[in-house]
Amino acid sequence: MRLQAAALALALHASAAHAGSPSCSGTLSGAVKGAFSCTVEAAVNAAGNVRLVIAAEAPPAGVKTLVPAELEIPGPPAAGTHTLKTLVGARASVSTAAGASWSAAKAKRNRGEVSLALESLERERSAGDALTVSGSFHARLVGAGRGKKGEIVLDVTF
């Protein structure tokens, strides 16, 4: 009986933890087209900024690597809109098996465009500096290196 109660408690805990996880999906349009499922991780870093990573579970057909977003948002954590001008760091990229690549990034000379709209950020009670977030991300990726043809528009909701 105790074993069943412990198993039920563990299952309820796992179910509650999973229920708080936001869904995440994205699309690529332009020079490369496709859809993908993703995960979102956000946490407050040592500098007090929010590190937000959107990772594709699997890239669309024809895409070799896909980095939807690696962002550093100035702290403290708060809802709002951010661009390359206001982000501390930003990177999004796509490359194909044929060797063509596109990116948007915060750098000395910014590449492409990035817009992050955070609707909510909540601290996860049991996960230290981890945050549960919801919002959307939009980027215009420009050609990089060989194969600089066209642009890619990347849209993610989470």
Image (tube, grey):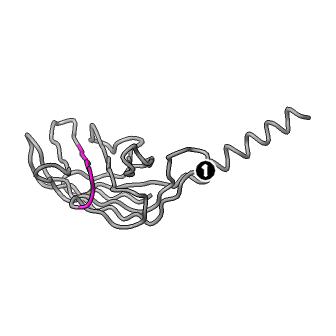
Q: Is residue 36 above or below residue 97?
A: below
Residue at image point 32% right, 50% down: 71
Q: How many residues crowd mark 1 within 10 Å: few (<14), some (14–19), many (20+)?
A: few
Any magenta on residue 89?
yes
Indicate the position of residue 129 as horizontal and vertical percent values. 50, 46
> Which residue occupies the foreground of this view, 3 or 98?
3
Q: Which residue lies most toward the front here?
A: 47
- Position of 8 compared to 56: left or right? right
- Position of 84 compared to 18: left or right? left
Q: Main secondary structure of the magenta part?
A: strand
**Total residue callouts:** 1
Any magenta on residue 21?
no
Residue at image point 15% right, 36% down: 99
- Position of 57 compared to 140: left or right? right
Q: Which residue lies most toward the top here?
A: 3
The quarter of the image holding the N terminus is top right
Q: Is residue 24 above or below residue 45?
A: below
Identify the image quadrant of residue 118.
bottom left
Residue at image point 22% right, 35% down: 97
Indicate the position of residue 89 as horizontal and vertical percent values. 26, 50
Q: Secondary structure at mark 1?
A: loop
Residue at image point 60% right, 50% down: 125
> Which residue occupies the foreground of this view, 83 or 47?
47
Indicate the position of residue 37 as horizontal and vertical percent values. 43, 49
Indicate the position of residue 58 as horizontal and vertical percent values. 39, 41
The quarter of the image holding the C terminus is bottom left
Chain part drawn in magenta: 86-94
Residue placed under numbered mark 1 in the picture: 125
Look at label 1 and name its amino acid: Arg
Q: Is residue 140 above or below residue 41?
A: below
